[in-house]
């Protein structure tokens, strides 16, 4: 089963017909998402398979993330389970660049108290902090520069493969996890 891709302009007129699953972290989802989207973070996809199978039986599934990389991964996983789904090309970034509406705050949520930063911002902070720490510590202990080199190499690998190991690790932090009750409510609504 191959993965279907849809552009934002193809999705917009069909949005009410689609079951939209956003596989970003809850903080990213809360910062703005496609109208009517359900949040099931990528690392919780296996728990949601039966609910997604039920939802796919009632209509088409559209899987979204920020850029399309995580949603493509999710579609591959669903295809392996015999669940048809399409991915949004360019993700929510392409959606908002075209001026399509989103649910969630219209302002910059990262300044709100208790707000979780978008994953790409978390990665930039973590990578930059590690590189800077390696360079500063390297003034006293030369081997610490290898931390900077390792992170730089990881960023290059990330760009070449369109994957991000650091984002996968950061996604496991407690503030990037859905509350159990929210995930249960989402799964119940999809299984409906």
Image (cartoon, rainbow, N blue to C red):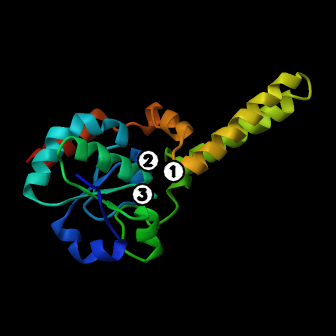
Counting from the top left corner in percent of width and height, residue 33 is at 36, 60
Q: Quadrant of residue 99?
A: bottom left
Q: Residue at x 19, y 64 (%)?
A: 18
Counting from the top left corner in percent of width and height, residue 139 is at 91, 29
Question: Disc 2 versus disc 1: distance between alpha carbons?
Answer: 6 Å
Q: Earlier in the sequence, mark 2 or mark 3?
A: 2
- Res 117 visible: no
* Farthest right residue in view: 139
Foreground pick, 173 / 135: 135
182, above or below 10, in the image: above
Q: Residue at x 49, y 44 (%)?
A: 114
- State the residue position of label 1: 118
Residue 60 shown left or right of residue 24 in the figure: left
Residue 50 shown left or right of residue 131 in the figure: left
- State the residue position of label 2: 27
184, above or below 99, in the image: above
Question: Disc 1 versus disc 3: distance between alpha carbons?
Answer: 15 Å
Counting from the top left corner in percent of width and height, residue 162 is at 52, 50
Q: Earlier in the sequence, mark 1 or mark 3?
A: 3
Say what secondary structure mark 3 lies in: loop
Are there few (<14), some (14-19), or many (20+) residues within 10 Å of tag 1? many
- State the residue position of label 3: 68
Say what secondary structure mark 1 lies in: loop
């Amino acid at each position: 089963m191959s993965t279907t891709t849809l552009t934002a302009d193809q999705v917009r007129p069909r949005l009410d017909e689609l079951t939209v699953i956003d596989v970003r972290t809850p903080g990213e989802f809360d910062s703005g998402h496609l109208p009517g989207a359900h949040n099931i973070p990528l690392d919780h996809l296996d728990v949601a398979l039966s609910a997604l199978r039920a939802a796919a039986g009632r209509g088409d599934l559209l899987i979204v993330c920020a850029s399309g990389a995580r949603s493509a991964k999710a579609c591959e996983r669903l295809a392996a389970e015999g669940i048809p789904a399409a991915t949004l090309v360019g993700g929510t970034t392409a959606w908002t660049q075209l001026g399509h509406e989103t649910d969630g705050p219209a302002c910059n949520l990262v300044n709100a108290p208790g707000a979780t930063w978008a994953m790409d911002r978390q990665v930039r902070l973590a990578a930059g902090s590690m590189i800077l720490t390696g360079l500063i510590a390297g003034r006293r202990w030369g081997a610490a520069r290898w931390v900077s080199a390792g992170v730089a190499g990881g960023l290059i690998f990330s760009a070449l493969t369109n994957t991000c190991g650091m984002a996968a690790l950061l996604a496991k932090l407690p503030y990037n996890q859905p509350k159990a009750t929210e995930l249960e409510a989402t799964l119940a609504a999809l299984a409906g």
